[in-house]
Image (cartoon, rainbow, N blue to C red):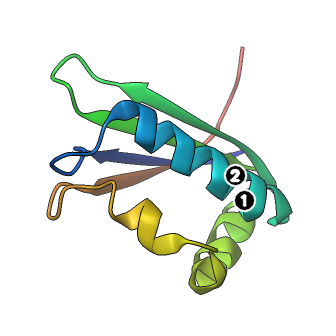
């Protein structure tokens, strides 16, 4: 498995409820249709920021979806949830799961 970890802060005047609503729409309208998509987990960190863990079957599936991001319906609503300059990301490839 391959995981994208994305850490960010919410934009001003964006509530967690709004983030979750938009994320649900993105999952239903776009992510579930991406080959190799497994799950998208949204976590709140102790400092109030968020870390999303998006799990894919493979690195190739994740990279292919990145190329298709231009086709996300209502992408502007999604991007508006994030505070500019607050997004950072990492990628993990599972070695073992016990």
Determine which of the numbered discs, if any, sits on residue 27 in the image: 2
The percent position of residue 86, horizontal first and vertical second, equals 17, 54
Q: Secondary structure at mark 2?
A: helix
- Residue 28 in the image: above or below residue 24: below
Q: Residue at x 64, y 44 (%)?
A: 24
Quarter-of-image position of residue 55: top right
- Residue 78 in the image: above or below residue 98: below
Position of the N terminus by quadrant: top right
Classify 10 Å Cα crowding around label 2: few (below 14), some (14-19), many (20 and above).
some
Determine which of the numbered discs, if any, sits on residue 55 in the image: none
The percent position of residue 47, horizontal first and vertical second, equals 15, 22
Badge 1 vs badge 2, beta-carbon distance below 8 Å: yes
Q: Residue at x 72, y 59 (%)?
A: 31
Comparing 3 with 11, the one in front is 11
Determine which of the numbered discs, if any, sits on residue 31 in the image: 1
The percent position of residue 72, horizontal first and vertical second, equals 62, 75
Quarter-of-image position of residue 77: bottom left
């Amino acid at each position: 498995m391959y995981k994208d970890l994305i850490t960010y802060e919410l934009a001003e005047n964006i509530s967690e409820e709004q983030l979750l609503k938009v994320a649900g729409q993105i999952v239903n309208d776009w992510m579930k249709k991406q080959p190799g998509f497994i799950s998208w987990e949204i976590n709140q960190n102790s400092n109030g920021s968020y870390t999303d863990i998006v799990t894919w079957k493979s690195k190739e599936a994740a990279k292919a979806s990145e190329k298709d991001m231009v086709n996300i319906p209502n992408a502007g609503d999604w991007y508006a949830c994030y505070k500019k300059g607050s997004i950072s990301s990492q990628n993990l490839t599972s070695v073992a799961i016990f």
